[in-house]
């Protein structure tokens, strides 16, 4: 049933996008995209590479805090592979985050899994804080009914509270808490039962990171904060390249903030349809010209597919490489 609902929403989203595209004269939209020069394409490509590098650097610091080791290049390749897996399969970003752990050799997978969970939590905390500030500052700029303003503000603050709670549970033993919860309700999931020991060990690695003090944690949060602003700058530059020369940095920040959750929900590869419908709504809300917005969506889709292709190449080379020294497995 849930799968059917996801497909229906995706079809509706794609339908709305197609109708908007056809009503705006497809030739003009495509001409807008073709006006992007080779140098501008190279700039966007390098900006996205910089985004991945920030991600790899933050993950590396967390991994070292969990007593693991891996090079920036290893983690960068794992992130690209995770992007390909998440973008081209129905698992979306959640699947990509899990897949990247299996792309790093030479380190205990329990350590890698623990570090990936902590790193993603800190990344989301940094992004959420910036996005909350953006949404709250926008409430006074966007003409919305009072009820919707309070709804946006409440949802933004709820995200911060949930992430803070999640981080707190990691310090106390996230997986152990989950196992106790399942035991009290006599829930037995074969995959969980096979990995009880590994999940408990992952808790200990997460605890090691949080016990190392606040300094490294703040550094990682700062890196992910810079990464978020880098992402906003990338989208802003992309908008300028497709003709939105008068768009403000604040509008770009809001576009990234409100649109970022469209790709989190699993269901269809690349959040097909959901992504398009979300951004169509945001273009109307933020008064971004629809022709420019549709050109941006098409452009981002193509760039994401290119990076997914690079990720597939990384996966192929990884499979051909000689097997790394066997480490403890989480599955």
Image (tube, grey):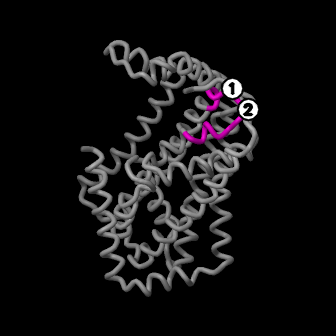
**Could you tell me residue 121's position as x and y percent?**
53, 37
> Which element is circle 2 on?
loop
The answer to whether the residue labelled 1 contacts the one labelled 2, judged by CB atoms less than 8 Å apart, is yes
Which quadrant of the rendered structure holds the N terminus?
Answer: top left
> Residue at point 45% right, 68% down?
297
- Residue beneath disc 2: 106
Give, as a single range, the part of the protein colored magenta: 99-112
Q: In this view, does 15 lie above or below 188?
A: below
Q: Is residue 187 left or right of residue 54?
A: left
- Residue beneath disc 1: 327
Q: Is residue 246 above or below residue 147?
A: below
**Could you tell me residue 209's position as x and y percent?**
64, 26
Q: How crowded is mark 2: few (under 14 residues within 10 Å), some or many (20 or more)?
A: few
**Could you tell me residue 58's position as x and y percent?**
66, 42
- Residue 5 visible in the shown view: yes
Which quadrant of the rendered structure holds the C terminus?
Answer: top right
Q: Residues within 10 Å of mark 1 (few under 14, many from 20)?
A: few
- The quarter of the picture where residue 111 lies is top right
> Which element is circle 1 on?
loop
């Amino acid at each position: 049933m849930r799968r059917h609902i996801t497909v229906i929403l995706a079809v509706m989203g794609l339908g709305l996008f197609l109708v908007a595209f056809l009503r705006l004269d497809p030739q003009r939209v495509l001409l807008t995209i073709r006006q992007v020069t080779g140098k501008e394409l190279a700039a966007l490509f390098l900006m996205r590479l910089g985004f991945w590098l920030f991600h790899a650097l933050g993950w590396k610091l967390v991994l070292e805090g969990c007593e693991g080791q891996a090079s920036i290049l290893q983690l960068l390749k794992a992130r690209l592979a995770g992007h390909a897996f998440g973008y081209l399969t129905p698992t979306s970003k959640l699947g990509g985050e899990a897949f990247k752990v299996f792309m790093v050799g030479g380190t205990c997978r329990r350590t890698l899994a623990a570090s990936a969970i902590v790193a993603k939590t800190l990344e989301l905390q940094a992004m959420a804080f910036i996005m909350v500030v953006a949404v709250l500052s926008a409430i006074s700029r966007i003409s919305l009914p009072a009820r919707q303003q309070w709804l946006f503000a409440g949802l933004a603050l709820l995200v911060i509270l949930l992430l803070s709670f999640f981080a707190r549970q990691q310090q106390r033993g996230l997986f152990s808490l989950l196992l106790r919860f399942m035991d009290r309700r006599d829930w037995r999931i074969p995959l969980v039962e096979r990995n009880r020991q590994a999940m408990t060990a992952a808790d200990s690695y997460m605890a090691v990171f949080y016990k190392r003090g606040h300094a490294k944690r703040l550094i990682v949060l700062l890196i992910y904060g810079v990464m978020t602003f880098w992402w906003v700058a990338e989208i802003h530059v992309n908008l300028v390249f497709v003709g939105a020369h008068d768009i403000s940095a604040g509008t770009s920040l809001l576009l990234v903030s409100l649109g970022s959750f469209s790709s989190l929900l699993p269901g269809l590869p690349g959040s097909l349809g959901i992504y398009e419908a979300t951004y169509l709504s945001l273009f109307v809300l933020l008064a971004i010209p629809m022709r420019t917005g549709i050109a941006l969506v098409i452009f981002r889709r193509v760039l994401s597919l290119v990076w997914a292709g690079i990720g597939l190449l990384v996966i192929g080379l990884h499979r051909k490489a000689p097997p790394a020294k066997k480490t403890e497995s989480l599955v």
